Image (cartoon, rainbow, N blue to C red):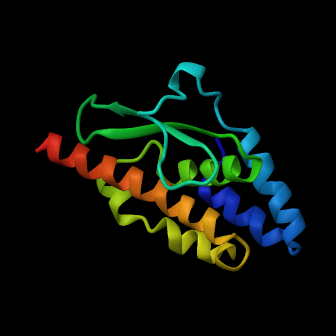
């Protein structure tokens, strides 16, 4: 999986938004395949115009829990946005997740001016879903 720092570096190299969109679509193609059985109502992210699924797995081996995710979407660009969200959050502790502002990162990349309002709302829904998972994991750990 591509790291958020690699994504940031690659975005800085791409001046044109057509190139950035192509890169986002390519990121979506790098997502780990999500088993069809995980395209369930439980994993579906509400608030997205496109269909988006996030499968949460919690690793509780010693120390703080680690939240890991698989994600998928039926739309190419949204699948790429899922890949960026997972680069930020998957494999992290709940505390790290709660301290990381994904919207600020997406604004840094310029998405505020280049995503439709519907995609922006879907992005917020994905982030809120993961942050809710992090809060629940913290509550279970204490």
Compared with 39, 7 (above or below) is: below
- Whole-percent x, y for residue 5 in the image: 63, 60
- Of residues 51 and 9, the one nearer the viewer is 51
Compared with 17, 23 (above or below) is: above
Write down the quadrant of residue 121 in the picture: bottom right
Q: Residue at x 61, y 54 (%)?
A: 49
Left or right of residue 113, residue 4 in this image = left
- Whole-percent x, y for residue 112 in the image: 64, 77
- Whole-percent x, y for residue 111 in the image: 67, 72
- Of residues 137 and 91, the one nearer the viewer is 137
Q: Residue at x 24, y 32 (%)?
A: 62
Left or right of residue 41, residue 23 in this image = right
Q: Residue at x 62, y 76 (%)?
A: 108
> Which image quadrant: the N terminus?
top right
Q: Residue at x 25, y 52 (%)?
A: 135
Left or right of residue 117, residue 130 in this image = left
Q: How many marks?
A: 0
């Amino acid at each position: 999986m591509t790291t958020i720092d690699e994504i940031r570096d690659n975005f800085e190299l791409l001046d044109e938004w057509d190139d950035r969109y192509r890169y986002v679509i390519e990121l979506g193609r790098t997502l780990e395949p999500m088993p069809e059985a995980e395209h369930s109502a439980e994993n579906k992210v509400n608030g997205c115009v496109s269909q988006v699924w996030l499968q949460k797995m919690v690793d509780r081996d010693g120390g703080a829990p680690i939240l890991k995710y698989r994600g998928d979407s039926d739309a190419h660009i949204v699948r790429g946005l899922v890949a960026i969200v997972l680069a930020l959050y998957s494999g992290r502790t709940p505390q790290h997740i709660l301290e990381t502002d994904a919207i600020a990162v997406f604004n840094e990349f310029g998405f505020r001016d280049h995503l439709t309002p519907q995609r922006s709302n879907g992005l917020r829904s994905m982030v809120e879903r993961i942050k809710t998972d992090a809060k629940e994991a913290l509550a279970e750990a204490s």
